[in-house]
Amino acid sequence: MKKTVLVVIAVLAAIVVAAHFADKATRLPRTAAAKVELPSAGNPAPDVTLKDLDGRDISLAQYKGKVVLVNFWATWCDPCRFEIPWLIDMQQKYGAKGFTVLGVAMDDEGQKVVAPFVQKERFDVGGAKSPMNYPILIGNDAAADKFGGLLGYPTSVLIGRDGKQIKRITGLISYEEISKAIESQL
């Protein structure tokens, strides 16, 4: 029994030490971290062109004049999957008023993983099973960098009709908060 306790303590100590060094290895140095600037409200949206699931080039500039919620997500991301029904609902509710969600899938495997996911998955929206009803684009690090980089998934950027960034949300969106922000732009 005593030997088992010592083994467990040794394993836990090894995990703590490994986690400490992994954390240190993945952090930006203070000087580099100080240089990271996230875009602020009022800045123009970046010039970004990505492929949709059919291989067509889609540019953010094509949506000028609309209110756009650019949503960076991944198929394996649980918080992303949690908010997809909200995005479907927002697209249904505000789409006819000049709003669109642009889903930017950031999966490393790209279209071969994203296309089947979008075709197969259905989400509970108001008691009905609904597919993703907004354009899905295949993202990459270069596109994310144009938005100031991503600190995690999901990350959403709300862009006004004038092409300027209004709001940036890292992590799960608040349905009420983003709905109010969208409504204020329509």
Image (cartoon, rainbow, N blue to C red):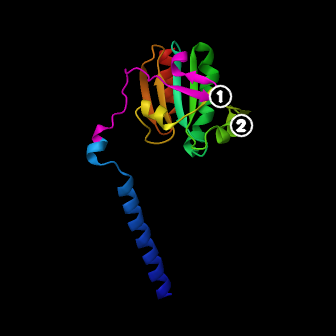
Give me the C-alpha separation between circle 2 and circle 1.
23 Å
Q: Quadrant of residue 109?
A: top right
Dot 2 or dot 1: first in sequence order is 1
Relative to 128, is 1 above or below?
below
Q: What's the magenta region?
A: 34-63
Q: What crowding class fits label 2: few (fewer than 14 Cα within 10 Å), some (14-19), or many (20 or more)?
A: some
Q: Nearer the viewer, residue 17 or 12?
A: 17
Q: Is residue 185 left or right of residue 127?
A: left
Q: Residue 122, which numbered label?
A: 2
Q: Quadrant of residue 16?
A: bottom left
How far across and how far down the image is residue 157, in percent?
A: 47, 28
Relative to 68, is 83 above or below?
below
Query: Residue, x 44% and y 72% (percent of image)?
Result: 12
Which mark's residue is nearer the viewer, 2 or 1? 1
How far across and how far down the image is residue 180, in percent?
A: 49, 23
Give amino acid for label 1. Gly
Relative to 8, is 27 above or below?
above
Give amino acid for label 2. Arg
Q: Residue 55, which numbered label?
A: 1
Q: Is residue 17 magenta?
A: no
The outermost residue toward the left is 31
Q: What crowding class fits label 1: few (fewer than 14 Cα within 10 Å), some (14-19), or many (20 or more)?
A: few
